[in-house]
Image (cartoon, grey):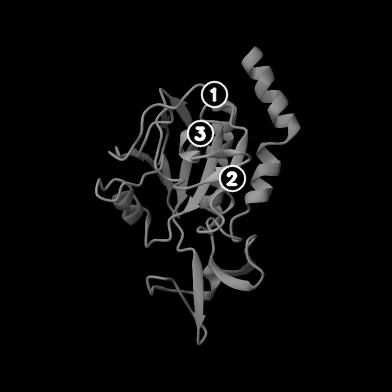
Amino acid sequence: MKIQNGRLVGDGIDHVESPNRGGRFGEGAPDTIVIHYTAGRSRQTAVDTLTDPARRVSSHLVVGRDGGISQLLPFDVIGWHAGESAWEGRTALNNYSIGIEIDNAGQLEERDGRFLSWFDQEYPEEEMVRGVHRNQTEVTCWHRYPDEQLQVVGDLCGLLVAEDGIAHILGHEEISPDRKVDPGPAFPLDELRRRLLSPPVAALTKAAEAG
């Protein structure tokens, strides 16, 4: 997998153009990745939503549970995924970030031993994890991310860090904590940051740019 002219090239990648977009990023951007879950039924339903002009939302990438990738916007174009958002003194994070949507039903409700999404789809217990959200205090149920999907998301973030000098990997829950809970405690966000944004990785990236 590699990036050519703002687009991913490799196996398992398809390209579907979303009309929901801003202009090109300004100087020094993007420098951030924002991780989301789709809170939907499938990768395809997410793509349908994110390319619907009536919905006025989009992201750069959607990653399916099987690791397949749909790219909806080139990496030099602003997407509409962050909404009202702020981080470290900056607002309107769309203007600085690449959005990655991960096919995942999100927070689940436990009812009589059954695990149900907000759209009333039931999931087996082996697809559920319990955890405390970083912005909450109680243990609740969440849809599990398959290992293959997590591997692809990690590879994508690593590629973007190396190619575009990404400095921040954030969850939607961190930039919009009053209204969003994705990607939630089932996603290893802190581990991903430690692995990809550590000083050795940054030093290697700078050395590669200098060479």
Marker disc for residue 28: 1
* Crowd tier of the residue under label 2, counting other residues whose Cα lies within 10 Å: few below 14, some 14–19, many 20 or above: many
Q: Residue shown at 31%/40% (left/top)?
A: 20
Q: Indicate the position of residue 191 as horizontal and vertical percent values.
A: 68, 49
Q: Indicate the position of residue 84 as horizontal and vertical percent values.
A: 47, 48
| Depth order, front residue of 175/46 | 175
Can the viewer see residue 203? yes
Marks 1 and 2, the one that precedes in the sequence: 1
Rendered-image quadrant of the C terminus: top right
Q: Indicate the position of residue 113 as horizontal and vertical percent values.
A: 52, 84
Image quadrant where residue 51 sits: top left
Which residue carries the number 2 mark? Answer: 170
Q: Secondary structure at mark 1?
A: loop
Q: Indicate the position of residue 93 as horizontal and vertical percent values.
A: 50, 40
Q: Residue shown at 59%/42% (left/top)?
A: 87
Kind of residue at disc 1: Gly
Q: Secondary structure at mark 2?
A: strand
What distance separates the C-alpha of mark 1 from that of mark 3?
A: 8 Å
Which residue carries the number 3 mark? Answer: 96
